[in-house]
Every structure is written in C-alpha cells, then in structure tokens.
Image (tube, rainbow, N blue to C red):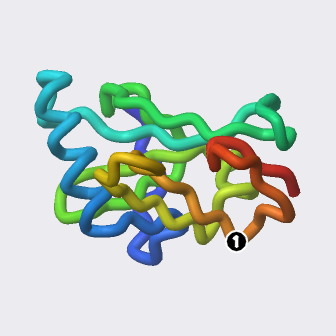
Amino acid sequence: MTQATQSSQRGIQLSEAALRQVKLLQEKQGGKDLCLRVGVRQGGCSGMSYLMDFEDPSKITANDDVFDYDGFKIVCDRKSLLYLYGLMLDYSDAMIGGGFQFTNPNASQTCGCGKSFGV
C-alpha cells in the first residue's frame, strides 16, 4: 500500500450524525477496517454527481487524501477533492428528506435531490 497524505485539517467535514451512520453501515458491511471513499463523477442532473462507497484500505493510493475521524477514515482522490474541498456530509433519519446530505461550498447549483451539483 502506498502511503497517502494524512491531513489533520479535514477537507471533507463529517457531522456526528453522519459519522454514527457510516460506522453503523461499516459494521453491516462486515469490515471494521473499511474506509469511506468519497468522490465525484460526470453526470447527474446538475453536471456532476457525488460518489460514496466503502473500500478496503489497501486501495488507498498516493493520489488520495485521507481524513481521519477517531480511527474512521474518509478517502478522496485529489481530482475529486478540487470539487469537494470544504464539503460537509450530514445525515438525517427524517422520513421525508432523510439520508445523507451534501453541503458543498464549491457548488454553484444543486439539483432538487441534492445528489448532484454544478460548478
């Protein structure tokens, strides 16, 4: 495994509610050592869409930034981080509008569902 950048200043912010939820999902995935990869791709109704998935830490590369939350790691490739720096990931269990919410200071527009954005 190539050592990635460990950043004490977190380019991706995670609320307490989101941290609880991702740790719960991590447990259900069966891997306490899994990290959460966050990124972007072309597509979605506003031009770019968010990606989020668990990944084995062995897939972390030198082109990734790693943000540590008391042992839980969020990984983001540097190209995606250009669009996501300062992102706040939150979670709500509300019946309407619940789930993960992305607050991206770099987005000039977002879609109604909140899963895509434009810059």
Image coords of residue 23 (percent x, y)? 19, 45
Residue drawn 65% across the image and 58% down it: 84
Asked if residue 63 can be seen in this view, the reply is: no
Residue 17: image x %, image y %? 26, 62
- Quarter residue 116 falls in: top right
**Residue named by callout 1:** 105
- The quadrant of the rendering that contains the N terminus is top left
Q: Is residue 31 above or below residue 66?
A: above
Q: Is residue 28 left or right of residue 59?
A: left
**Residue at horizontal 74%, vertical 57%?**
82
Quadrant into which the C terminus falls: bottom right
Q: Is residue 33 above or below residue 90?
A: above
Regarding residue 72, the answer to whether it shows in the image is: yes
Q: Residue at x 64, y 49 (%)?
A: 114
Residue at horizontal 32 percent and vertical 33 percent from the top: 57
The x, y position of residue 110, in whole percent, is 76, 54
* Residue 117 relative to residue 12: left or right: right
Residue 79, percent from left and from top: 73, 46
> Regarding mark 1 in the picture, which secondary structure is present there?
loop
Residue type at mark 1? Pro
Residue projecting furthest to the top: 30
